[in-house]
Image (tube, grey):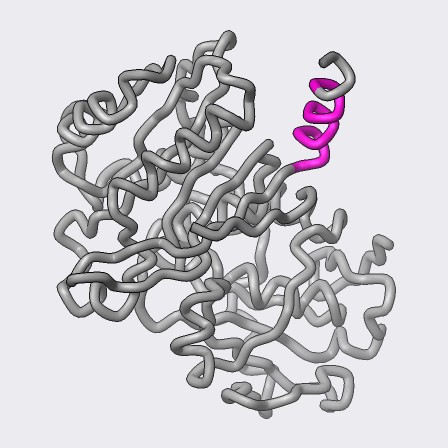
Amino acid sequence: MKYILSISLLFSPMLFGQKLLISHPEAQADNQCKGVTHYAATGRLGDQLLAYLHSKWISYRYGIPFLYKPFDYSDQFVFHEEEIPYETKAYHFPHVITPRPGDHIDYNAYGSGTLFDIQYFSESPWERLIWGPQWYTFSVDWKDPVFRKEMQRLIKPRFPIPPHEIPKDKISVALHIRLGGGFDPPRTWAAYPAKFPPPSYYIEQLRTIYALFHKKPLYVYLFTDDQHPLELVHAYQKQLSDLDIQFACREHDNHHTKNVVEDFFAQMQYDCLIRPDSNFSLVAGKINDYKVIISPILCSEQNGQVHIDTVLIEKSDEFLQMEKNWENNL
């Protein structure tokens, strides 16, 4: 298996109605007479949040007011109260631009009254390799400090969510295992295999985390849409019995339609994230300050089984400093 190492994970206020617009220093003031919105035709919470974030980046980067369209569970997020509702302003825009695959959009070149309708596209390297030609895509600077801080402010729960009780004396790991849970049909498994890595991927990456933290005890919580998470815990415990790992999960009443928002925010309480190619945890990794994130990059099929060929290990500045301190103490 190949590993790719990623090292470490201005303010201009403008008004649009009653809303304050946080924008990039290079944004043009006359873009305030335009608008940008988001669209994800189908998909689960992670897909909708990613479409939201992409459009928010265009809003921030070019100083274009953002118009918000509600989606499933969105009323449980802070941005539901903060954003300008699409239906209250859409009629102001006689010109709607929906960028298409291959388009090179100069957002500054369009006149006032233009609304940019940004369609969903994936951040997955594997999905872009296979499906990329069907999407209009652009790059987001996920490390831009102002944009990052604003997204962390907006993507918060509107209502209190009880936190997980995580042991303080262990390195905590959020392990996101997507198995479909009755939601994903067989065609999704065939078209997007990296969303459903085999158990060997998670076992190997838990061993990687254990080694990276110099064999410190781990507390691993399984976040999954599977209806029998305790069976998964027992299987992983058996495979990793030689390591000092405490496993936990929701032991009863787990379902892909239950505890969705609770799990989304709970996974961000942990030190590390091991995830599949799923937007549910990808979005968490983009806005949360994890010490280490491990995710699949390339996969293949061998004898009908998915195999993860290349993974990405992202290390935060905090973790890199920890590594230097460990080296100095040797």
Q: Position of residue 99 (x, y in %)?
A: 55, 86
Residue 47 appears left or right of 200? right
The quarter of the image holding the C terminus is top right
- Which residue lies at the image location 72% right of the left edge and 90% below the top edge? 110
Vertical placement of residue 216 versus 259, above or below: above
Q: Nearer the viewer, residue 210 or 142?
A: 210
Vertical placement of residue 245 versus 82, above or below: above
Is 320 contained in the magenta span? yes
Vertical placement of residue 269 versus 218, above or below: below
Q: Position of residue 179 (x, y in %)?
A: 21, 48
Q: Nearer the viewer, residue 42 or 330?
A: 330
- From this viewpoint, which residue is outermost toward the top? 169
Residue 84 appears left or right of 223? right
* Residue 51, visible in the rendered structure: no
Magenta: predominant secondary structure element?
Answer: helix
- Which residue lies at the image location 46% right of the left edge and 58% below the top edge? 297
Vertical placement of residue 322 versus 52, above or below: above
Q: Position of residue 235 (x, y in %)?
A: 18, 28
Is 50 contained in the magenta span? no
Residue 212 appears left or right of 308? right
Residue 15: quadrant of the picture:
bottom right
- Which residue lies at the image location 36% right of the left edge and 40% below the top edge? 261
| The residue stretch that appears in magenta | 316-326
